[in-house]
Image (cartoon, helix red, strand yellow):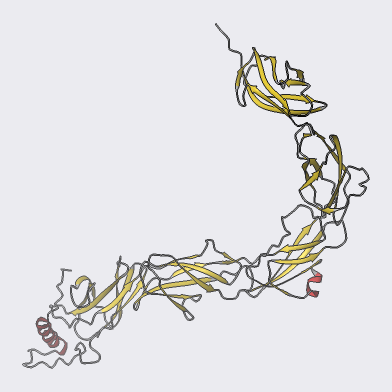
Amino acid sequence: MATRRIIVTFTVLGLGMIGLLAVLTGCESTPAEPEFQNVFDLDVNGGANPFELTASVSGSTILLSWTQRDGYGISFYELSHSFNFFSDFLPIGSVDHTGTGPSSFIYENAEPTRTHYFRIQAFDNVGNFTRVSEQVPVSRVTPPLLALAGGGTAVASRQITLSVTVSSGDSLRISHDPDFAEEVRVAVVEPGQPQTIPWTLPAAEDNDAAPRVHVLAMTGSALSDTAKLTLNVDFSPDFSVPGNPNALATRNLDLVIPVTGVVEMRFADSEENLALQAWAPADTTAPFELADSANPQTIWGEFAGDFGFNVITSLEVTPDLLDQVGFAFDVGDDHLTDESLITVLADAAATEMRISESLNFAGAAWIPYAEEVKVFLGAVPGRRDFYCQFRNDWAQSDILTDYVIYLTQPLEVAISAPAEGDTIPSGLSLLVRGTSIAAAGTAVVDSVKFDAGDGEGFLLADGTENWTFNWSIPAVAEETARVIRARAWADGDSVTTSLSVTLQPEVEIE
């Protein structure tokens, strides 16, 4: 079909209507004063849109639909489009007349966020034409970006927060109904920026439910495509005990509760007994007392959720019988200390502990368990043996022991050369140098010994205040880390220092 030109000026339209009137009424000549009394006139039968042209949006396409008018000699329909209401209409296609009933045309790749105007005009087979119909506006607005604030799709509560971003628009329509029979309208704060909106989901029967949220944007009266978010209900409040220990020290627990979506809750020692318990309001913690039994036990919990259904879950706990405990002083491997207040390191699932220098714990009271406890050594020097015992609501531990060598003689000893982290050639001799000193007014340093970390132990060095040791370094095949030590004695007390060095393989000279 040849390209057809749409006539839009009033004068030409008038002439065209005269011609078509002649065709439609069967007249052989044009009346001197045409009355324009036909279905296409603006003042007859709502003639501004005689073809009942409508436009609807679906994605990036716009469907134009109209009613065909039979009996008037119409051959085809020409459609035009513009972004302006009054002007700049351009042809977009033609559709042949097929008789009465509906007809349609698809306008593809519609530019989003703009209003489109469409018109229709009918032609007969010799070029006569009708009036141009009144403009039909329609807008295609891109759908909002819709997500759950915080991400994901699983929800434990009806009370959620949506994150909505629109490219353009002045308001949002939100509904759980795809037909928006029930909806809430929210003003757009700033197009292009995420906007958080609180939302209440409908009730659900169980965790298999998949509620949906539908959102579309409005620009004036123009609607965007609908964004849809499908969620899945996951109301599974798995409660726990503080710290999630493998075994418990006490019968009296403060259960930790994930309260999202929880309306009421109750707990029992069996599933059957849940129905006998009173409901309590949702809280982050709940007190619970275990049975006086050293056997594993199960705690049952029932939670009423705001979706409208209940969930029953359980937690198995095990009493700790204190067969794995630890007790040690926070001193070096040599057990030496010159501090009168030292730290005990404890490791037990206990509620109480006691520490004493007496095996029968004479006069030692039980104190609350702590992982670190301070012990005062007083003024008595030498080796000090201590005993420790733990207990909880189920058991009492065996007695553990550890010792310290308490040095009341203030001494200092140092290694001057080599220095910490030095790399030393192996297979050679090295003169190790150092110093030692005793506090003024106390006993003098008796001796200094050196330990090369080779298993030979401490060997006597030359001198005390400024001492030396001739170290014959053994040859090594690869780099080897060593810890070397020096120890000074004064009147039976001693003090030790250490540093780390690396022995380098012996260099072969060709």
In the depicted structure, whether residue 30 falls above or below residue 322: below
User: What is the x, y in percent for residue 359?
Assistant: 92, 43
Q: Is residue 251 left or right of residue 153?
A: right
- Residue farthest to the top? 510
Residue drawn at x 77%, y 24% is 444
In the depicted structure, whether residue 269 falls above or below residue 487: below
Residue 480 visible in the picture: no
Image quadrant where one finds the N terminus = bottom left
Residue drawn at x 69%, y 65% is 257
User: What is the x, y in percent for residue 59?
Assistant: 37, 68
User: What is the x, y in percent for residue 14?
Assistant: 11, 85
Image quadrant where one finds the C terminus = top right
- Residue farthest to the left? 32
Number of callouts: 0
Residue drawn at x 66%, y 19% is 433
- Residue farthest to the front? 441
Instruction: Depth check: give the residue in front, 401 or 91.
Output: 401
In the depicted structure, whether residue 250 falls above or below residue 35: above
Residue drawn at x 52%, y 61% is 151
Quarter occupied by residue 426: top right
Instruction: Depth check: give the residue in front, 483 or 233.
Output: 483
In the depicted structure, whether residue 242 falls above or below residue 2: above
Residue 463 visible in the picture: yes
Quarter occupied by residue 138: bottom left
